[in-house]
Image (tube, rainbow, N blue to C red):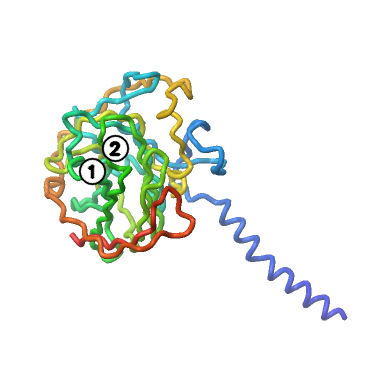
Amino acid sequence: MICLLTWTSFLWILKSIPCTFGMAVNEQTDGTCPLLNVQDHRFSEVLDRPLQIAGFDLTEKYLQRKGTVWENLPTFRLGSSPLIKPTKSVFTNGFSSEYSLVTTFRVRRTTKKDRWYLWQIFNQAGISQVSVVVDGAKKVVEFSYQSALKNTLRYTFKGRDLQNLFDRQWHKLGISVRSNIVSVYMDCKLVERKLTDEKETIETSGRTLITTRVEDGRPVDIELKQLIIYCDPYMAEMENCCELIEPKCEAWETLNGTSPPLVTAQLPQMLSQPPSQPIDRCHCPEEKGDTGGAGLQKNTGQKV
């Protein structure tokens, strides 16, 4: 009887160990992503968002100057100084492997047909590790990254809703990057999903830039309200478009600070090289559970 009780106790303790360990792991944070101070009104009330939101406010990191106000919203007019920084100064403790990029901007008359990097990280050798390209001439958005095999793969998103991104009005663009899926949202509506291959870990020894023309590495003349990278791939889906529908949904304040220093270092040569055309090898049927009529596609990018 004693042996039976002892054996039962041992099994109970053994069974409880994984659960206890799992709880401890879930509660730990690796310190990669700092906590963000964001307003509750930005997120949909239908979806449960995390109690603590972590990520990087690139608007704050790159645009430390006074922003003008348009319809009670702070707006930054870009296109004068190159916006490029050492990656280590932007992502101090490294970069999350899964994330969301959310931005609100509008193109101008002179730039609505430009092809430009919304965001790009390249390593010390000048090789692009990850980038988001906005192409006004083709009215598409491209997401590219370096794969685990050291190839650069490019995925082109060209849903009908994306054409409105170039009509010189304010729009919100969201990109959710998971381990094997990239999803693009336009004005809080899912446009398209694509299956992706394994990604290489991003180095922090190079540089990171925003809003830069692909053709010549010069700043692109657009107006920007926000550019945030959340360390959660589901945050792109959780954001709403309150400020696009009703600008007075929040009492916005003008951002203050000092003008960013002019970067005189020459951009890597790879910025001026036109990328190869993407290849869409497979268009898979719509996945169950998708919204907005966007199907999940497998798209093997062009090796560069």
Residue drawn at point x = 35 percent, y = 60 percent: 297
Q: CA distance from mark 1 to mark 2?
A: 8 Å
From the viewer's perspective, is residue 254 above or below residue 275? above
Kind of residue indicated by mark 2: Leu
From the viewer's perspective, is residue 13 above or below residue 58? below
Image quadrant where residue 74 sits: top left
Residue highlighted by disc 2: 165
Relative to 290, 105 lies left or right: left
Residue highlighted by disc 1: 139
Kind of residue indicated by mark 1: Lys
Q: Position of residue 286 (x, y in %)?
A: 40, 59
Q: Which mark is residue 229?
A: none
Residue drawn at point x = 74 percent, y = 73 percent: 10
Which secondary structure lies at badge 1?
Answer: loop
Q: Crowding at label 2, few (<14), some or many (≥20) Cα neighbours within 10 Å?
A: many
Image quadrant where residue 212 sits: top left
